Image (cartoon, rainbow, N blue to C red):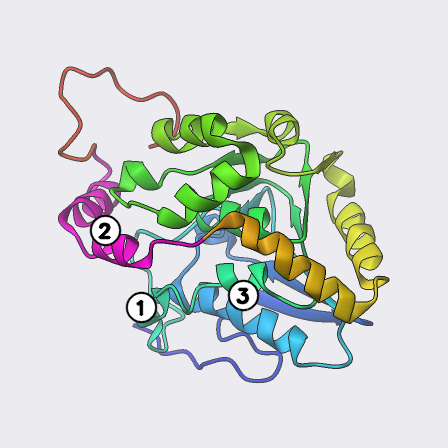
Amino acid sequence: MTTGRPPEGDWLGTPYLRFDRQGAVARVVVDRPQARNAMTGAMYFGVRYAVDLVNGDDGLGGLLLTGSGDVFIPGGDLGGDTVDDWGAPALLGLDNVPFDAIRYSPKPVVSAVNGIAQGGGLLMALLSDVAVASERATFRAPELLRGIADTGYAAFLPAQIGPGRAKDMLLTGRVVTAAEALDWGLVTRVVPHAEVEDAALEALHDCMRMAPQAYGEVKRVISTAYGAIDRMTMLDSLAGPEALEGWTAFKERREPAWIRPELPPRKGRR
């Protein structure tokens, strides 16, 4: 196991996140192509740290989040890779992942969804002030396939797209196209793939033109519409036998034990 070093300054604690300053804009790129941008604990915490870094720096007015290649963020690395570990497995608690930080960030956070967004990546896009998606982007919430009762999704998705569509996504694990995501209100802007980062940057600039104190106050009220996460239920689920079986099955490239043998094989990815 390679020991990394925790965040400091513009170093986000992992070589798989790039933090760039472009004038008053901070740009964070998830860049782990060898694992299709799968997030380690250090990477999740690094995005969390970046949001705080932007909010604490008077020279920065907003954060742009995107991925490399044809993947935005696919969620956590279930393979258990700790190549950037500096105590990172313990960072997967709900206080250390970036979701609430993005949701309540006083300064704007805009996502340029350049490709696959699922798991934690979908949550980051959903909770951003604006999510601009490539026409090639796809969205998915596969947590129940992994044995995880994600009460964040159970609260956020119905508020964003309505209970019926939320059930369709969460209870079937289906893939949602960019066109469907726009129609449902999962994202609000879809653009040609080559234009996604420029369009997201334009949206961020527009957010940064608003009066900052009033912006934060209005955003705080809007954020309450997502409701509260049932933390105790989710923590129990993450530590429970179904989550362990879901992780083990994924790592061993097999179906979880709870799937009835008479069911036909699932189409597409596991």
Q: Mark 3 is on which residue type?
A: Ala
> In x, y percent, where is residue 145?
29, 36
Region in magenta: 228-254
Determine which residue is flagged by label 2. Answer: 237
Residue 232 falls inside the magenta stretch: yes
Label 3 neighbour load within 10 Å: few <14, some 14-19, many 20+: many
Position of residue 211 in the picture relative to residue 262 (left or right): right
- Is 156 above or below relative to 104? above
- Residue at the image point whose x is 18% and y is 35% from the top: 256
Label 1 neighbour load within 10 Å: few <14, some 14-19, many 20+: some
Determine which residue is flagged by label 3. Answer: 101
Residue 239 falls inside the magenta stretch: yes
Determine which residue is flagged by label 1. Answer: 89
> In x, y percent, where is residue 88?
35, 71
Q: Which numbered disc, 3 or 2, marks the residue that appears first in the sequence?
A: 3
- Tell me the element at label 3: helix
> In x, y percent, where is residue 74?
47, 46
Q: Mark 1 is on which residue type?
A: Pro
Instruction: Name the image quarter holding the N terminus.
Output: bottom left
The residues tagged by marks 2 and 1 sit, at their Cα atoms, a distance apart of: 17 Å
> In x, y percent, where is residue 2?
34, 74
